[in-house]
Image (cartoon, helix red, strand yellow):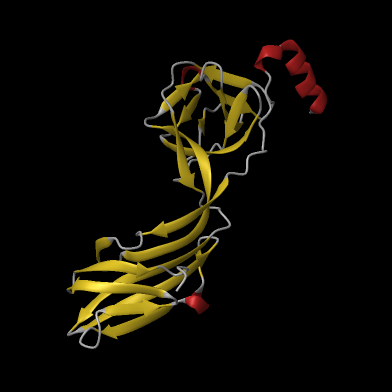
């Protein structure tokens, strides 16, 4: 197979390409809402979110794109970057929604999406390290939090109100998986105080109903006391 690949590349030198996997993204701190900000959320929505995640570049297509006369079809969505060299950037063949580049019956399998830097041409790299390209395909580059990121997040969710008591749910996520041992549901009596706190975070409850809550962030999970 290696000899076959080499022979094909020698015959079709301009069509040869190999994907790169040297891109790691950037670690990003997450903190929402800001200290002192007033916000309103509904039941089941995040009141407080803090942690870190891996921010990645992604190639975004707004609509279905056809390559090589329709032999390949790229579904709309965001495709995370895997690598780069001086000539091009390389991306996964599956988008963040789980849809993959569609391959026709007689077409070679695809291993990477390639975006050429000098002219923004979009190419698909096959298992034989050959590429099939199309010009004038509209794309944008977006920043997304990778679903595979080695991240950690702390969340407080609003769970409703009964009488003068409100319910909050605390959740921790590591690698996008809930840490069951670090999840808890708590209640607060607003007749005692409109300030509620958990694991260092402190919120002032301005108004609460069984549908939504309006509050102000006094201190986040890791705000120095």
Instruction: Classify residue 195 as left or right of residue 207.
Output: right
Instruction: Classify residue 43 as left or right of residue 115.
Output: left
Residue 106 in sight from this viewpoint:
no
Residue 157 in sight from this viewpoint:
yes
Residue 36, image x and y in percent? 31, 63
Q: Nearer the viewer, residue 117 or 191?
A: 191
Quarter residue 39 falls in: bottom left
Q: Quadrant of the image for the N terminus? A: top right
Q: Quadrant of the image for the C terminus? A: bottom left
Instruction: Classify residue 20 as left or right of residue 219.
Output: right
Say above or below: 132 vs 36.
above
Residue at 25 percent across and 68 percent down: it is 215
Q: Nearer the viewer, residue 106 or 63?
A: 63
Residue 176, image x and y in percent? 51, 60
Residue 97, image x and y in percent? 44, 45
Q: Nearer the viewer, residue 61 or 11?
A: 61
Say above or below: 55 vs 223.
above
Instruction: Classify residue 107 as left or right of residue 69.
Output: right
Residue 192, image x and y in percent? 24, 88
């Amino acid at each position: 197979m290696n000899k076959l690949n080499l022979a094909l590349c020698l015959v079709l030198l301009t069509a040869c390409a190999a994907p790169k996997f040297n891109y790691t993204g950037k670690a990003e701190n997450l903190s929402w809402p800001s200290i002192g900000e007033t916000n309103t959320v509904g039941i089941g929505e995040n009141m407080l979110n803090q942690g870190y995640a891996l921010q990645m570049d992604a190639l975004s297509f707004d609509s279905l794109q056809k390559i090589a006369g329709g032999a390949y079809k790229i579904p709309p969505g965001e495709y995370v970057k895997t690598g780069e060299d001086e000539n091009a950037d390389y991306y996964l063949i599956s988008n963040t929604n789980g849809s993959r580049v569609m391959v026709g019956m007689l077409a070679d399998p695809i291993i990477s999406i390639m975006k050429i830097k000098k002219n923004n041409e979009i190419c698909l790299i096959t298992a034989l390290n050959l590429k099939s390209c199309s010009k004038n395909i509209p794309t944008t580059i977006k920043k997304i939090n990778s679903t595979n990121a080695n991240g950690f997040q702390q969340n407080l969710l609003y769970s409703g109100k009964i009488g003068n008591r409100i319910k909050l749910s605390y959740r921790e996520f590591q690698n996008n998986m809930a840490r069951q041992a670090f999840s808890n549901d708590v209640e607060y009596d607003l007749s005692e105080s409109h300030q509620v706190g958990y694991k260092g975070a402190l919120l002032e409850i301005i108004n609460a109903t069984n549908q939504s809550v309006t509050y102000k962030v006094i201190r986040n999970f890791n705000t120095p006391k």
